Structure formats: structure tokens, C-alpha cells
Amino acid sequence: MADLLMNDMDNIIISEAQLQSRVAELGRQLEDDYSGKEPICIGILKGAIMFIADLIRATNIPLQVDFMAVSSYGSNTRSSGIVRILKDLEDNIKDRHVILVEDILDTGLTLNYLLKNLRSRQPASLEICALLVKDAKKGMDLKPKYTGFVIPDNFIVGYGLDYNEKYRNLPYIGILKPGIIDE
């Protein structure tokens, strides 16, 4: 299956080795910053599933994991502008150190909504760990404390990111060939 999916790629922009190396570095940063604490990592489904799984394995501190599922894209390649919570947290985050683990910071719409929602729950601290930040968004007021990679403003897939629920299982991040995406 991976070979079939590879045939759809125009360009691989972040290799599996680059991903694993950077995630390990982020894990060490979290260890340093949260030493003596027990943070809760909140993964945003479905896109962050690969990232959070690798990130928590690369982090040697006590921590908890919870998930939220939100939607602002549907089956489109551009945000609809409306954020919906599809799955909420199971754990109470009041007075907890929260690390919001996101696959990609694109328009900032979803993340702004989530930050406002989570801050209302009174965590001790709330930081963003984003695997990818689109380069065109430099002027955005959201500044993740932890960033994996800054990437061009292209629609990308792989390592949890999808197009119509396909390509999440790729171990790298790439750009699809022209004509693959129905816009």
C-alpha cells in the first residue's frame, strides 16, 4: 500500500529520518521544561496521532495523554471557518500543566478556538507543541513554544495528515502530485 501511495507524491518535503530526529529533540525539550511536573499532553485528532505517539515515547517524564477531536476542514483542503468539537477531554485540566499537541498550524482558527476553550478550564499552564507551522503564517499572533518544522504554504499529507482520510500512514510528509486533489 505504501508504494501505491508513494506514487501519488510529487515531492517529499520532510523525510522519515528528519521527522524522527526532530521529534526526539522536542521530547528532550519537554523533559527539560517539565522536569518535576506531570504534564498532560492533549493530542488533536486525527492529524496529530502519529506525532503525539512518537513524541510521548521520546519523552522520559511522567505524563498523561488525552485527546480532542475538532473539525474545521471537513473533506476540503481549506478551512471552512467553523470549528466544531467532535470529542472533548476525558480528564479535568484545572491546575494542570497542559501541552496541546497539534499536527499543523495553518490558519490559526482551530488553535485559537481550542486555546480559548482550554484556558477557560483554568490549567496551571498551557503551551502549544506544533509539528508543522506554515511559513506564510509568520504574522499570526500564535507562537507555539515548541515547533517541529516551518514549511511552505502547500497542502501536505503524511505522518498523520490526510487528504480524504488517505495518506495518514505515510512515514514522511509530502506534497501530492497535481490532479490528485479534487478542488
Image (spheres, helix red, strand yellow):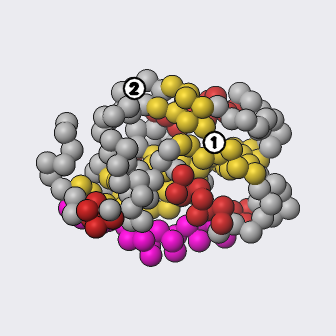
- Residue 122 in percent (x, y) is at 77, 33
Which residue is at 70% across, 49% downward?
65
Label 1: how many Cα within 10 Å (few below 14, some 14–19, many 20+): many
| Quadrant of image for the C terminus | top left
- Side of 43 relative to 62 (left or right): left
- Residue 19 in percent (x, y) is at 47, 68
Which residue is at 81% across, 54% downward?
38
Q: Tag 2's secondary structure?
A: loop
Residue corresponding to mark 2: 81
**Residue 29, visible in the rendered structure:** no
45 drawn magenta:
no
Image: magenta residue range: 9-29
Mark 2 → mark 1, Cα distance in angstroms: 22 Å
- Residue 140 in percent (x, y) is at 44, 41
- Side of 53 relative to 14 (left or right): right
Q: Residue 129 carries which label?
A: none
Name the N-terminal-most of marks 2 and 1: 1
11 drawn magenta:
yes
Which residue is at 38% across, 33% downward?
73
Q: Tag 1's secondary structure?
A: strand
Which residue is at 38% across, 71% downward?
15
Residue sticking out furthest to the right: 36
Q: Which mark is residue 67?
A: 1
- Residue 27 in percent (x, y) is at 64, 66
